[in-house]
Amino acid sequence: MVKHPIGDLNEGERVLVDAVKVTADIKTVFIVKGRAYFYSHFRILDDPSG
């Protein structure tokens, strides 16, 4: 779930992560809708219903 508005994503929006990558300086990024976002912009939901 998106913590706050960032790029084309809205606060509270549930998104699927297409891939998880690591930058050259060892920072985790999620690929969502073809764009990379730092993982800290998201809350991980382990139950799809909420």
Image: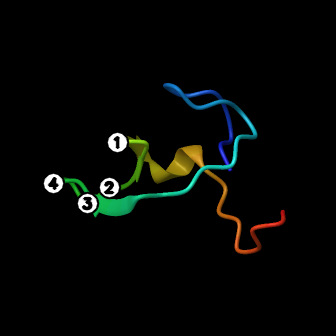
Q: Nearer the viewer, residue 45 or 16?
A: 16
**Is there a contact, CB below 8 Å, between mark 2 and mark 3?**
yes
Instruction: Return the mark for residue 49.
Output: none
How many numbered marks have been drawn onto this rendered protein structure?
4
Mark 3 and mark 1 lie on one chain; the one further toward the N terminus is 3
Which kind of residue does numbered mark 4 sit on? Answer: Ala
Q: Residues within 10 Å of mark 2 (few under 14, many from 20)?
A: few
**Is there a contact, CB below 8 Å, between mark 4 and mark 2?**
no
Q: Position of residue 39 (x, y in %)?
A: 48, 53
Q: Residues within 10 Å of mark 4 (few under 14, many from 20)?
A: few
Which kind of residue does numbered mark 2 sit on? Answer: Lys
Residue position marked by numbered label 2 in the rendering: 27
Residue position marked by numbered label 4 in the rendering: 24
**Is there a contact, CB below 8 Å, between mark 4 and mark 3?**
yes
- Closer to the camera: disc 1 or disc 2? 1
Q: Residue at x 71, y 33 (%)?
A: 11
- Find residue 21 and report its image quarter: bottom left
Q: Residue at x 83, y 66 (%)?
A: 49
* Quarter of the picture holding the C terminus: bottom right
Which kind of residue does numbered mark 3 sit on? Answer: Ile
Residue position marked by numbered label 1 in the rendering: 34
Horizontal placement of 29 versus 21: left or right?
A: right
Horizontal placement of 25 versus 44: left or right?
A: left
- Closer to the camera: disc 1 or disc 4? 1
Instruction: Return the mark for residue 26.
Output: 3
- Closer to the camera: disc 3 or disc 1? 1
For numbered disc 2, what is the local secondary structure?
loop
- Find residue 9 and report its image quarter: top right
**How far is the residue under mark 1 from the one under mark 4?**
19 Å
